[in-house]
Amino acid sequence: MASKVYRICTLPGDGIGPEIMAEAKKVLAALGSKHDVEFACEDHLIGGSAIDATTEAGEKPTALPDSTLDAARASDAVLLAAVGGPKWTTTDPDKPRPEQGLLAIRKQLGLYLNLRPVRMYPALLDASPLRRDLLDGVDLVIVRELTGGLYFGTHDRQKDVAGAAADGGAGQKAVDSMEYTEAEIERVVRWAFEAAERRPKHRVTSVDKANVLETSRLWREVAHRVAAEYPSVDFSDMLVDNCAMQLVANPAQFDVLVTENTFGDILSDEASMLTGSLGMLASASLGAGTALYEPSHGSAPDIAGKGIANPLAQILSVELMLRYSFQMDDAADEVAAAVTRVLDEGWRTADIADDATPADHVLGTAAMGDKVVEALS
Ligand code: IPM
Ligand code: MG
């Protein structure tokens, strides 16, 4: 018997989800024996697979069954892979969508903050579409607000609205509202400053669209107020369109980037390409209760079932889980070092391979997971 047991609610979800989750579990098993802890993983349904299962059982179709939410709440941490796929894609507001499961679990667990570290791996510098010299010194983290803004505002579709059709007649109108309270802004901004104090660059950039949006003007006021409490942190704000440009023009200027939900979603996909692939970007969703860890990428339906997906963002999400939920910094460092070593040795999945990668060094999902496990020992 291990001296300590951690219960992990594992949510493989859809697309490549089950394939990359299998590799994360291998890594957990290897770490467990090494550190004398047991990581007890229990799979539950979320996303499109939950919609299918509830439909088949004759229940009301849902992307987040109550049993999953209960299991998540009862666990020490949640590890999620990915949700979504063309099978469930619909614009019909009355049909369930896989992404609703993800949004609902974030909201229900009170995970108001999403952390996406953009870490450079020297071995992958040529995998990035950006020139090497631009990538020098890049080490940033995006702190994204996760349970407010457009994502959780009013979503409405109105029919027969006078003058809404292109010909001037009655047509449809859609509404998504964006709201933020001071409290919602302050808790993420404060977290960003706390994090910046412990990082080498000591810098916070707060990203908004204060020249247009009222929510952004409130965001900016709160950010400035909080900034005054952290005089040792170099603080500035930046408009989101400028930030999108700066991320490719001069990414090394950033340290902690804090922003609202939608901006953070968009900027984090952009920032992932600094590392060479969205397949390298892990994330931690933190809040009051059980935390959730997931790769920043989606379910990649185009390559699902082929065994070629990159499992590293999922494995690096385990690293974040060890750090933030289990305070196992040594084990977390080992995972990070193992990934670095595997890449330094030249092993690649297809998404991070380039012309210089020998064919026998391009690995499938399971082989890449095995390499990381090997590097751990
Ligand atoms: C992400 C994803 C999700 C989001 C989708 C799948 C709903 O893009 O985690 O970045 O928009 O938050
Ligand atoms: Mg996204």
Image: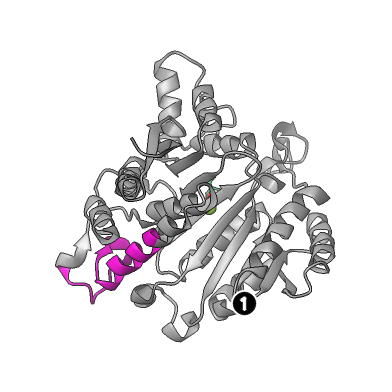
Q: Is residue 187 rendered to the left or right of residue 87? A: right
Image quadrant in which the N terminus is located: top left
The residue lying at 27 percent from left, 53 percent from top is 369
Nearest the eye: 234 or 208: 234
Q: Residue furthest bottom?
A: 133
In the rendered structure, which segment of residues is drawn in magenta? Answer: 334-359
Q: Is residue 188 left or right of residue 301?
A: right
- Residue 286: x and y, percent? 60, 47
Instruction: Examine the image and state in which quarter residue 4 appears.
Output: top left
Residue in the picture at 57% in, 65% down: 141
Where does the image place residue 137, in percent across and percent down from the top left? Answer: 51, 81
Q: Position of residue 155 (x, y in %)?
A: 69, 37
Circle 1 — which element?
A: loop
Task: Name the residue beneath numbered marker 1.
Answer: 201
Outermost residue to the top: 58
Farthest residue to the left: give it: 360
Judge whether residue 367 is colored magenta.
no
Quadrant for the C terminus in the image: bottom left
Camera-side residue of 37 and 207: 37
x 50%, y 54%: residue: 323
Task: Tell me the kind of residue under disc 1.
Answer: Lys
